[in-house]
Structure formats: structure tokens, C-alpha cells
């Protein structure tokens, strides 16, 4: 019985390590899974701006339509960026709003010119 339980446990991906708030989740290109309802929505950091208090870090994100039921599921989605469909190409958000939810960095994808173009076209949207 124990051997069967261990074998089943080996098939699951290992739990993602907990990261302290602020470490990696404001790095351009970081893919973040954050709790939304009953799953984890994927976001990718395009630009992080450090603004004076009380604003603090302000993120420009790409928001993806796909959600994973668990952090491991979201990480698996993040490993296949060609299958992701963005909902919003440049969504500005105060980092504190993201950090108030359960979240983890689950991947990294270098920024493309297309990613940066969405940010540049919305430069008038600033806090």
C-alpha cells in the first residue's frame, strides 16, 4: 500500500517553492499564477515601475485567459506559451493588489517586441 502511494506521489509534479513577496514577481518577463476564484490565472510582467509611496511598485501585465485549477496546473500552462491567449495586452495594476492574493512565479518568458509595443501604445495610462 505504501509503495502504491509513493508511486502515485511520484507522478505528480513537485509543489512549487514558496517565494517571499516581492522576490521575482516584479521582474519583466516573469509569469505569475495568482488565485482568482477557484483557480489560478496567469499574468506576465511587462514593466515594473517603482513609484513613491503610497503607490509603490506598479506593474504592467499581460493577462491570459487560461486558468489552472492548481499552481502546478498553472505552471504547466506557463511552460506552453504558444497555447496561451491574452485577454488584455497591457493591464496596469498596483503590485500590492497582486501580492494580496495567493500567487507564485511559475515561469519566465523573455519579452518580445509585441509585448513592449502594447506597453508603449498605452504609455498615457499611468498612476
Image (cartoon, rainbow, N blue to C red):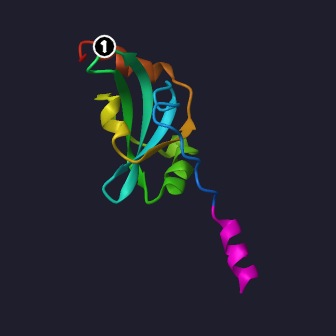
In front of the other: 77 or 117:
77
Q: Quarter-wise, where is residue 15 in the image?
A: bottom right
Against 7, is 89 above or below?
above
Residue underneath mark 1: 52
Instruction: Give the residue at the far bottom of this rendering.
Output: 1
Question: Where residue 14 sits: x, y (%)?
Answer: 64, 57
Residue 87 visible in the snapshot = no
At x 54%, y 49%, the residue is 75
Q: Pick out the residue farthest to the right.
A: 3
**Residue 102 visible in this rendered orientation of the protein:** yes
Question: Vertically, is 62 above or below 28?
Answer: below
> Which of 67/12 is in front?
12
Residue 34 percent coordinates (x, y): 40, 45
Instruction: Kindly state the secondary structure of the residue where label 1 is placed.
Output: loop
Question: Residue 86's spot in the image, x, y percent?
Answer: 38, 38
For the N terminus, the image quarter is bottom right
The percent position of residue 44, horizontal first and vertical second, equals: 45, 33
Left or right side of 34 for 7: right
Query: What's drawn in magenta, residue-wise?
Result: 1-12
Image position of 76 (left or right of 36) = right
Amino acid at each position: 500500500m505504501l509503495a502504491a502511494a509513493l508511486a502515485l506521489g511520484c507522478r505528480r509534479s513537485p509543489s512549487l517553492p514558496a517565494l517571499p513577496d516581492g522576490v521575482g514577481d516584479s521582474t519583466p518577463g516573469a509569469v505569475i499564477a495568482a488565485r482568482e476564484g477557484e483557480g489560478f490565472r496567469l499574468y506576465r510582467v511587462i514593466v515594473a515601475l517603482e513609484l513613491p509611496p503610497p503607490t509603490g511598485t506598479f506593474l504592467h501585465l499581460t493577462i491570459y485567459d487560461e486558468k489552472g485549477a492548481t499552481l502546478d496546473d498553472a505552471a504547466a500552462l506557463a511552460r506552453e506559451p504558444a497555447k496561451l491567449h491574452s485577454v488584455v495586452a497591457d493591464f496596469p495594476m498596483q503590485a500590492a493588489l497582486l501580492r494580496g492574493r495567493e500567487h507564485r512565479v511559475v515561469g519566465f518568458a523573455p519579452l518580445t517586441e509585441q509585448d513592449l509595443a502594447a506597453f508603449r501604445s498605452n504609455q498615457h495610462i499611468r498612476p
